[in-house]
Image (tube, rainbow, N blue to C red):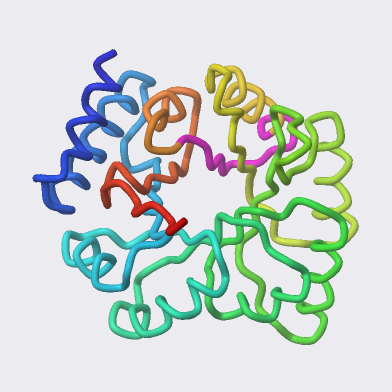
Amino acid sequence: MAAAQSVQTAIEPSRTIADRLAAVRAEIDVAARAAGREAASVDLVAVGKTYDADVMVEAIEAGQRVFGENRVQEAAAKWPALKARWPDIRLHLIGPLQTNKVKDIIGLVDVLQTLDRESLAEALVRARDRGASLPELLVQINTGREPQKAGVVPEDADAFLARCRDGRQLPVGGLMCIPPAEEPPALHFALLRDIARRNGLAQLSMGMSGDFATAVRFGATMVRVGSAIFGARAAKPA
C-alpha cells in the first residue's frame, strides 16, 4: 500500500516534473535497498509518449538523462535536436518496431527494447551487414501469452535468444516484458528474471508507473515510467 500511495503522490498535478522525478527516484531507492541492491543499479527510463519536447526539457534540466518513446515517428520528431543539445542522453524505443522502420532507428535510439520476432532480427542483421551500428537490443517476452501483444512466448524464449545471439551475433543484452493488466505483475517479473538468469542476460526492463517498485524488488535494471513523472496523458480526441 505504501508504494501505491507514494506513486499517487508523485502524479499530483500541482507537483513539478522535478518533484515527481525526485519522488520516483526515492521510491526506487527504497525498493532497491529492500532488495539489498544499490539504487544506481536501476535505470529510470522516463517515457515521453505523447508529451512535447518542452516537457522533456523540464525533465532534462532536472537531471534526467534516460528516456523512452513508443513510436519511431515521435522519437524522430522530438529527440535529434534534444540529443544535439544534451549529448549524454540515452534514448530507448519501447514500442513495436516494423521491419521497414529499422533504418529509421539507426543513430536515433541507443536501446531497442522490443526485438520480438524472426523477421525483425533478420532486418537488424541486414542493417548491420550494410555497415549500421546497431543499438543495444532487448528481447520482448510475452509473459502472459496474450495474443494481442507482441513478444516471444516464454517456452520459445531460449531458442529465440540462441538464434539471435549465437546464430546472428546480435547484441542482445537483456529482456523486457509488459505483464497483463489484470494479473499480479510479480509473477511475470519472476518469470522474466528466471529466463534472463538461465540465459546469462544482465538487463531486465520491467515495471511501469503502477508497479515499478515491485519490479525493482524482482531485479529490474530498467523501469519505464511515464505518467508518474509527467502527469496524466491527454485523452485522444473522439
Residue reaching furthest top?
1
Query: In the figure, is residue 76 to the left or right of 152?
Result: left
**In the picture, residue 57 is in which quadrant?**
bottom left
Taking depth in this image into account, of 197 and 184 the one nearest to the observer is 184
Q: Residue at x 42, y 28 (%)?
A: 211
Residue located 70% across and 75% down the image: 101
**Residue extending farthest left:** 14
Q: Residue at x 21, y 27 (%)?
A: 6
Identify which residue is drawn at 78% across, 36% down.
147
- Specify the quadrant that holds the N terminus: top left
Q: Is residue 238 above or below residue 98?
A: above
Q: Quadrant of residue 146?
A: top right
Query: As drawn, is 100 to the left or to the right of 66?
Result: right
Of residues 119 and 110, the one drawn nearer to the viewer in this rendering: 119
Q: Position of residue 60 (x, y in %)?
A: 24, 65
- How many marks the image carries: the answer is 0
Q: Which residue range is magenta in the image?
A: 196-207
Residue 201, horizontal then vertical, whole percent: 65, 41
Q: Is residue 235 above or below residue 7?
A: below
Q: Is residue 24 above or below residue 82?
A: above
Q: Is residue 224 above or below residue 57?
A: above
**Is residue 231 part of the magenta span, yes or no?**
no
Q: Which picture quadrant has residue 142?
A: top right
The location of residue 55, given as percent across then percent down, is 25, 65
| Side of 4 where 9 appears, left or right | left
Q: Nearer the viewer, residue 28 or 178?
A: 178
User: Residue 222: x percent and y percent?
Assistant: 46, 44
Residue 114 is left or right of residue 125, and the answer is: left
